Image: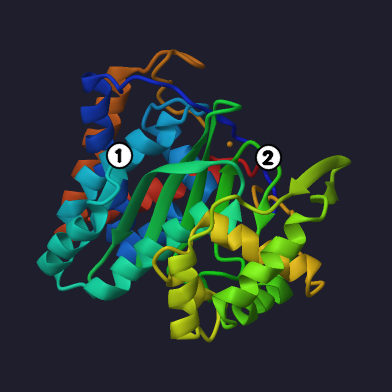
């Protein structure tokens, strides 16, 4: 993906004002309606999976471009707005442990493939919490899906040390959950142990080979490596320390030995295989088997009606309401065959200069 800009997301506490949030729901629903009427539900999901398009949409809806709330508030508004079009959403901020139940409930409403969507939700969260160790802990996760099983995930992690957030985008079109799977990631660039990078392919294979060994052999590897000095790796002239974690889930490793996973995705999907276990396996893969690890951080902007905090200017409530009304009217008229306004909106694009 070509880098076209940077958006840092500082952690901002508080809630969106009620007057703004209800307008975000209405305007977001109107914009979505125009896209769905013209291009279909699948196209809307594809657009939402693009971090730059999502960022622009949040700005159009009046939210701050440089706030962690850009993610949480915009996804909450879309979750409420899109159900009228048959696009369901599950999860949100602080919804850990409830998302899978919500997927089941909403998937039944539209006869969507429940298990497929639950698996996508679980694996996207597992990868960004364990296989991509970038210092950001997930606290927000939302999955959007339609009746055909098309899904996207938008989730966000926080780094309490630098007080920034990072947003991760996923789409069903990814060929694998563990080989360059992200549609895009937006946030402050840093350093990461990236086990889903293409460069970590051999380390992933070595990790699977290791867990197929008896846990006692893994324990011997760990004891031997703990006697060595921590491995140093250079990234952008900075020294990273890859050290063996103190706590490892041995029950999960025993289960992995019993299961004998055939690939890295199967191993990662095992309950209890978390960040510490992944790091230990990566350490063994590099120092014992010589497999390359990737330290490449996968992180790769438009205001229309103003921003919540008055940046670059206060939200114009009247303009926001008028834009919503125009779009809603356009959708209704398009449904009964009046395409003139829809075509007029298309022609407006000709007057927008290319960036």
Residue shown at 68% from the left, 77% from the top: 206
Q: Nearer the viewer, residue 229 or 34?
A: 229
Instruction: Tell me the quarter of the image containing the C terminus.
Output: top right
Residue 23, placed above or below residue 145: above
Q: Nearer the viewer, residue 97 or 322?
A: 97
Residue shown at 55% from the left, 61% from the top: 277
Q: Is 332 on the left or on the right of 184, as rendered?
A: left
Q: Is 342 on the left or on the right of 223, as rendered?
A: left
Res. 94 mark: 1
- Tell me if mark 2 has few (under 14), some (14-19) or many (20+) residues whose alpha carbon lies within 10 angstroms of its own: some
Residue 335 appears anywhere in the view: yes
- Residue 199, image x, y percentages: 74, 68
Q: Residue furthest right?
A: 237
Residue shown at 58% from the left, 36% from the top: 301
What is the quadrant of residue 216 in the picture? bottom right
Q: Nearer the viewer, residue 31 or 293?
A: 293
Closer to the chain start, of discs 1 and 2, is: 1
What is the quadrant of residue 351 in the picture? top right
Residue 294 appears anywhere in the view: no
Residue 45, placed above or below residue 316: below
Residue shown at 69% from the left, 54% from the top: 2
Res. 189 mark: 2
Q: Nearer the viewer, residue 342 or 169?
A: 169
């Amino acid at each position: 993906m070509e880098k076209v800009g940077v958006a840092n997301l500082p952690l901002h506490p508080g809630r969106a004002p009620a007057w703004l949030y209800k307008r975000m729901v209405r305007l977001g629903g109107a914009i979505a309606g125009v896209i769905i009427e013209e291009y279909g539900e699948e196209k809307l999901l594809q657009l939402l999976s693009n971090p730059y398009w999502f960022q622009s949409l949040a700005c159009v809806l009046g939210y701050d471009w440089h706030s962690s709330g850009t993610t949480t508030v915009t996804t909450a508004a879309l979750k409420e707005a899109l159900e009228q079009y048959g696009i369901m959403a599950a999860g949100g901020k602080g919804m850990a442990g409830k998302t899978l139940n919500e997927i089941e409930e909403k998937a039944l409403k539209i006869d969507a493939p429940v298990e497929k969507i639950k698996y996508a939700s679980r694996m996207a969260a597992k990868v960004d919490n364990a296989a991509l160790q970038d210092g950001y802990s997930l606290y927000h996760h939302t999955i959007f899906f339609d009746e055909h099983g098309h899904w996207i995930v938008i989730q966000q992690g926080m780094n309490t040390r630098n007080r920034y957030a990072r947003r991760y985008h996923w789409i069903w079109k990814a060929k694998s959950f563990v080989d360059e799977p992200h549609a895009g990631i937006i946030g402050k660039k840093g350093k990461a142990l990236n086990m889903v990078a293409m460069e970590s392919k051999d380390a992933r294979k070595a990790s699977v080979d290791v867990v197929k060994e008896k846990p006692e052999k893994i324990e011997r590897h760990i004891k031997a490596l703990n006697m060595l000095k921590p491995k140093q790796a250079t990234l952008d002239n900075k020294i990273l320390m890859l050290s063996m974690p103190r706590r490892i889930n041995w029950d999960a490793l025993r289960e992995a030995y019993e299961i004998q996973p055939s690939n890295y995705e199967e191993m990662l999907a095992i309950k209890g295989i978390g960040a510490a276990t992944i790091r230990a396996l990566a350490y063994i893969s590099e120092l014992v088997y010589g497999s390359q690890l990737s330290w490449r951080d996968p992180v790769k902007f438009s205001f229309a009606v103003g921003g919540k905090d008055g940046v670059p200017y206060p939200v114009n409530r009247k303009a926001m309401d008028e834009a919503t009304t125009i779009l809603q009217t356009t959708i209704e008229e398009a449904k009964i065959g009046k395409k003139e306004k829809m075509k007029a909106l298309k022609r407006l694009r000709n007057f927008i200069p290319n960036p």
